[in-house]
Image (cartoon, rainbow, N blue to C red):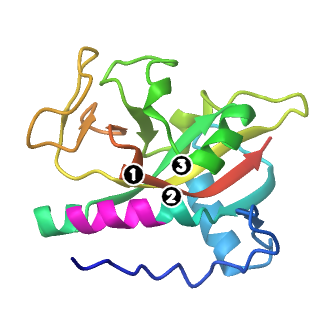
Amino acid sequence: MVLFHYQLPSNWQRPTTPDEICFTVPMASAEYNLTIDQFKATMKSYSPTIVRLERIQNERWYKQYKVHEDDFHKRLNKDTVRSLYHGCPEVSAKAIIKDGFNRSFAGVNGTAYGNGVYFATDANYSHSYAHVNSAGERCMFIVKVLIGKSIEGNSSMKVCPVGYDSTTNGSNIFVAYHDAQSYAEYLITYK
């Protein structure tokens, strides 16, 4: 049996403690500017004030995602990774950073396209799920999602039909059904 070794991203910082998995991205960096520019470009009608951008460096979750990504690439013989958005309350963001996206919470905000974790191509759509905290701040993740082979979903779907990896509304919403099918790269806190 061959075990795979996955290279961690080159932009990851060395943690100062074993539990440290969130790192503030410096405002003057190219990484910050590129990430925030992409976010703002998809906010459309809302002009956010950025409080901070944090890079998520959850090694366990990242390795699980990479194994899943390798499987998708072998099966489909192409790259199906998309950078998508997921807005949520601050308390949910803290749990996601630590343990990843959890399908057990599927249905909290609806199941129109299936009972999985929802992601959107536009931050503007996810903004409505990024509830304001006591400081007037909202949380939104930028997530690498393995779309794979997608099919239009409906509210009765608990899993994808055989041969498919995600469901969609046909344009800007994607639903993932496997916890290792996505990896949150960044958390944007904004007003």
Left of 179 or right of it: where is 102?
A: right
183 is higher (above) or lower (below) than 123:
below
Q: Residues within 10 Å of mark 1 (few under 14, many from 20)?
A: many
- Seen at 41% across and 44% down, the residue is 179
Q: Quadrant of the C terminus?
A: top right
Residue 90 versus residue 144 in the image, above or below: above
Q: Residue at x 61, y 71 (%)?
A: 34
| Corner quadrant of residue 157 | top left
Residue located at (82% from left, 75% from top): 16
Q: Secondary structure at mark 1?
A: helix
x, y (%) of residue 163?
Answer: 8, 43
Region rendered in magenta:
63-71
Q: Earlier in the sequence, mark 2 or mark 3?
A: 3
Q: Residue furthest left?
A: 163
Relative to 33, is 157 on the left or the right? left
**Residue that protrudes farthest toward the front in the picture:** 1
Q: CA distance from mark 2 to mark 3?
A: 27 Å
- Circles 1 and 2: CB distance less than 8 Å? yes
Q: Position of residue 17 (x, y in %)?
A: 81, 69
Q: Is residue 129 above or below residue 11?
A: above
Closer mark to the observer between disc 2 and disc 3:
2
Label for residue 180?
Answer: 1
Residue holding disc 3: 42
Percent coordinates x, y for residue 129 in the rendering:
60, 28
Left or right: 185 as drawn, with respect to 135: left
Return the residue at label 2: 61
Q: Nearer the viewer, mark 3 or mark 1?
A: 1
Give the secondary structure at mark 2: helix
The disc labelled 2 sits on which kind of residue?
A: Trp
Question: Circle 3 — which element?
Answer: loop
